[in-house]
């Protein structure tokens, strides 16, 4: 792994064990992109990217009339001076002009990876873990400097890119667009994969063949959103889960974003990703700089699963932080779907007592504990306990919960304010709003203006009091609406285009302060389920409530899609009651247990309502989960069969030592006279034998055996056990 600069050829070669990323400066000082893909021994491949003059492409170089920015593979493209494709960035100068021409100025290569000020990013723990490259580009006329930032990890085949724009001119300028990365591919023979959906239907896998013109995904909602995740992959059409070239681009950011693939007239593809230009404009005063979020680029020639495994390891180990990063996570019960707002201390303790008997470790008190909140129309902002429901306050409840042997967790939704609240009476202007215009409500609430330092400070102070007075072990940080009237009364007109991004920066500051001051609290982020399941939030909170949809069958698609980028340890997944509250489907308890056990396991139902034999099943499976949770949470994850393509979903987990594996499969609908299904396992050691721990008289009667060769399980496969009825599943364990 490393970064090599060939001085003679002015060629930069960033390489990992399997990947090469190559760029070079030309005689004219242009920075051109040569290659990103499978590792090359000889990086001198400029011959592949020669451009010639084409009709309607302007001659942009005095040295050679055949050269045009419009046809050159640009590393960080600029606009207005000949390149008609999408731009890496756009600056509006004081005189109104928006044309820029960047030329190479200098570069430096160093060990390690610098943090991005105020923004989440992947990190290193020692300088040996990564190498970094900074390339400074300059617009001679205006003094605008663009610093291209690269880091390549030693152990993960990932390249991180971000950009810093600096104003060395005498006048303020306006950044109208600043992408985190731009990538010029020499062809367009790709499918674009995206993770799209809706509330309760997050991160479904969608694929489309690239077409001439632009294809994009974006969020304009102020958050990364339920609808689009800040990730795309370009896949060769013949790529599968386990073979073929795949390129992933994931943005470490929680606000408005856009990812766009533009296929231009000669069939090349430019991919850009970064903060959405929608309503964005940033005033940059002389000598100020602007830092873009980080884009994490992963190439894999081993298919989509190969791509996912790089993201999983990197995000688990070098994006998530804190004491819980390497710790197995507790099995929890959350009272939301059990009680909604209708609870008192007695009811909570009744649930907690059953939870304790079942082997659950953490009790989470959800919405409704504060102010006068009996419905979703009041009290956000009033972060003091409701003594009607909790006569001895949170502290009293916490003590009783702990006396039962459980830890206490708490739900908060700090970014919001209800009109019907003490806080609103005191600070009616603390929400995002445009004076004189209606303040649009969503779920009966307004959004606090986190672009203002005093609002952020209020949150830090108020939440710190709640967290420290209650001795909390866990916090669920929710956010239940998107941003409207994105305007701040604290900023002048020419800075209103900054507010959406300033909101995110304010949120990051609040989170950074709280997670550093409360290192013993496990934080889980949430936004109406998975509305902000993004790498930015994972930097502060190492797990996310994956979706408000707790139906086991819906969860197959949600968790499958989520796993394209995010590891199972980051996905909160809970067993809930039937008929399911979101889709009214009735699924077997065993299937609900199995599906939830494939993530960060928990419960979200009135445990008192379980029948005795159901409790037995729950006890048994909590025990199994505790036994395999290190495998589930830290093992390698394999998608064997997709709910988007098949009636059968199959996933697999293998530990690092290849001595333990778990195989989960679930059949959506029963089939009459069903064909036999063989599934080929992955990730085992071919030379090892594996014992099927589930082996019993049922397996014996069905003709299975107890010991299997690892090679046989991977090459000949495993025969799916007969699943009788709809929505049936199995969780098999192998030990080698
Ligand atoms: C949305 C979350 O996703 C739910 O789990 C629950 O916490 C509710 N908000 C509470 O209002």
Image (cartoon, rainbow, N blue to C red):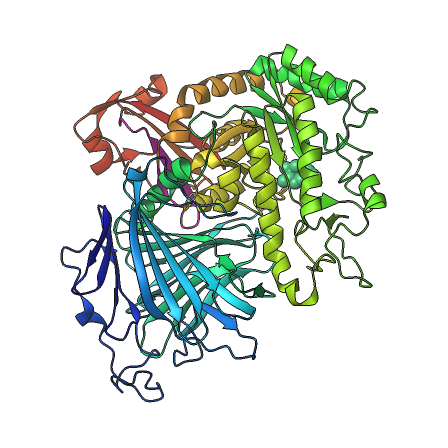
Q: Residue at x 19, y 32 (%)?
A: 711
Q: Residue at x 57, y 25 (%)?
A: 332
Visible residue check, residue 58 = yes
Q: Nearer the viewer, residue 664 or 305?
A: 305
Q: Residue at x 38, y 30 (%)?
A: 634
Residues rendered magenta in the picture: 637-657
Q: Position of residue 470 (x, y in %)?
A: 68, 22
Quarter assignment of residue 181 = bottom left
Image quarter in which the N terminus is found = top left
Q: Is residue 434 left or right of residue 123?
A: right
Please state the quadrant of the image where ligand 1 appears: top right
Q: Is residue 130 left or right of residue 261?
A: left
Visible residue check, residue 550 = no
Q: Residue at x 78, y 36 (%)?
A: 382
Residue 646 inside the magenta-drawn segment: yes
Q: Position of residue 430 (x, y in %)?
A: 76, 49
Image quarter in which the C terminus is found = top left
Q: Nearer the viewer, residue 270 or 206?
A: 270
Q: Nearer the viewer, residue 585 or 466?
A: 466
Q: Position of residue 710 (x, y in %)?
A: 21, 29
Residue 483 inside the magenta-drawn segment: no
Q: Is residue 146 left or right of residue 457?
A: left
């Amino acid at each position: 792994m490393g970064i090599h600069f060939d001085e003679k050829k002015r060629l930069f070669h960033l390489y990992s064990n399997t990947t090469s990323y190559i760029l070079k400066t030309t005689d004219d000082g242009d920075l051109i992109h040569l290659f990103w893909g499978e590792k090359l021994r000889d990086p001198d491949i400029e011959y592949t990217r020669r451009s010639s003059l084409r009709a309607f492409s302007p001659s942009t170089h005095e040295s050679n009339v055949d050269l045009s920015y419009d046809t050159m593979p640009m590393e960080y493209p600029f606009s207005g001076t000949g390149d008609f494709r999408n731009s890496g960035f756009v600056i509006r100068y004081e005189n109104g002009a928006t044309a820029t021409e960047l030329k190479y100025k200098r570069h430096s290569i160093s060990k390690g990876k610098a943090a991005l000020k105020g923004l989440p990013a992947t990190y290193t723990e020692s300088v040996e873990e990564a190498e970094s490259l900074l390339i400074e580009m300059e617009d001679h006329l205006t003094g605008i400097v663009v610093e291209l930032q690269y880091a390549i990890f030693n152990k993960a085949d990932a390249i991180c890119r971000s950009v810093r724009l600096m104003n060395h001119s005498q006048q303020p300028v306006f950044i109208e667009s600043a992408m985190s990365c731009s990538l010029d591919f020499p062809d367009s023979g790709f499918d674009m994969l995206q993770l799209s959906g809706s509330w309760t239907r997050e991160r479904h896998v969608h694929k489309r063949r690239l077409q001439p013109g632009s294809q994009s995904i974006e969020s304009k909602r102020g958050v990364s959103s339920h609808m689009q995740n800040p990730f795309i992959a370009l896949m060769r059409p013949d790529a599968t889960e386990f073979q073929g070239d795949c390129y992933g681009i994931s943005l470490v950011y929680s606000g408005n974003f856009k990812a766009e693939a533009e296929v231009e007239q000669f069939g090349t593809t430019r991919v850009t990703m970064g903060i959405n230009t929608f309503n964005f404009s940033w005033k940059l005063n002389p000598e100020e700089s602007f830092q873009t979020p980080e884009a994490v680029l992963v190439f894999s020639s081993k298919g989509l699963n190969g791509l996912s495994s790089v993201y999983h390891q990197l995000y688990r180990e070098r994006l998530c932080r804190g004491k819980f990063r390497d710790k197995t996570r507790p099995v929890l019960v959350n009272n939301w779907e059990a009680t909604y707002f209708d609870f008192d201390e007695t009811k909570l303790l009744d649930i907690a007592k059953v939870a304790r008997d079942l082997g659950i470790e953490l009790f989470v008190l959800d919405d409704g504990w504060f102010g006068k909140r009996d419905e979703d129309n009041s009290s956000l902002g009033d972060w003091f306990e409701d003594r009607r429901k909790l006569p001895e306050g949170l502290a009293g409840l916490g003590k009783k919960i702990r006396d039962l042997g459980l830890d206490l967790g708490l739900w908060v939704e700090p970014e919001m304010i209800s009109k019907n609240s003490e806080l609103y009476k005191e600070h009616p202007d603390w929400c995002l709003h445009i004076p004189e215009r209606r303040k649009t409500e969503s779920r009966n609430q307004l959004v606090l203006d986190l672009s203002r330092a005093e609002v952020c400070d209020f949150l830090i102070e108020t939440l710190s009091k709640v967290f420290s007075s209650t001795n909390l072990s866990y916090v669920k940080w929710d956010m239940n609406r998107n941003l409207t009237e994105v305007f701040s009364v604290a900023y002048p007109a020419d800075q209103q285009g900054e507010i959406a991004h300033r909101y995110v920066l304010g949120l990051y500051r609040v989170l950074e302060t709280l997670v550093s001051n409360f290192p013993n609290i496990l934080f889980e982020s949430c936004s109406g389920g998975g509305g902000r399941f993004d790498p930015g939030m994972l930097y502060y909170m190492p797990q996310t409530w994956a979706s408000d949809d707790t139906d086991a069958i819906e969860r197959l698609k949600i968790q499958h899609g989520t796993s394209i980028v995010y590891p199972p340890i980051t996905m909160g997944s809970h067993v809930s009651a039937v008929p399911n509250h979101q889709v009214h489907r009735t699924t077997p308890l065993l299937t609900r247990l199995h599906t939830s056990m494939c993530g960060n396991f928990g419960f979200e139902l009135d445990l008192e309502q379980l029948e005795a034999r159901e409790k037995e099943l729950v006890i048994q499976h909590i025990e199994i989960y505790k036994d395999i949770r290190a495998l589930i949470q830290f093992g390698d994850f394999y998608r064997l069969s997709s709910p988007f393509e098949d009636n059968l979903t199959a996933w697999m987990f293998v530990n690092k030592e290849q001595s333990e594996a778990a195989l989960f499969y679930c059949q959506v609908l029963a089939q009459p006279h069903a064909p036999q299904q063989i599934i080929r396992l992955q990730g085992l050691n071919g030379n090892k034998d594996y014992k099927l721990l589930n082996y019993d008289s049922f397996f014996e009667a069905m003709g299975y055996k107890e010991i299997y060769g690892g090679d046989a399980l991977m090459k000949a496969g495993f025969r799916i056990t007969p699943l009788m009825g709809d929505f049936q599943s199995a969780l098999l364990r192998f030990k080698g």
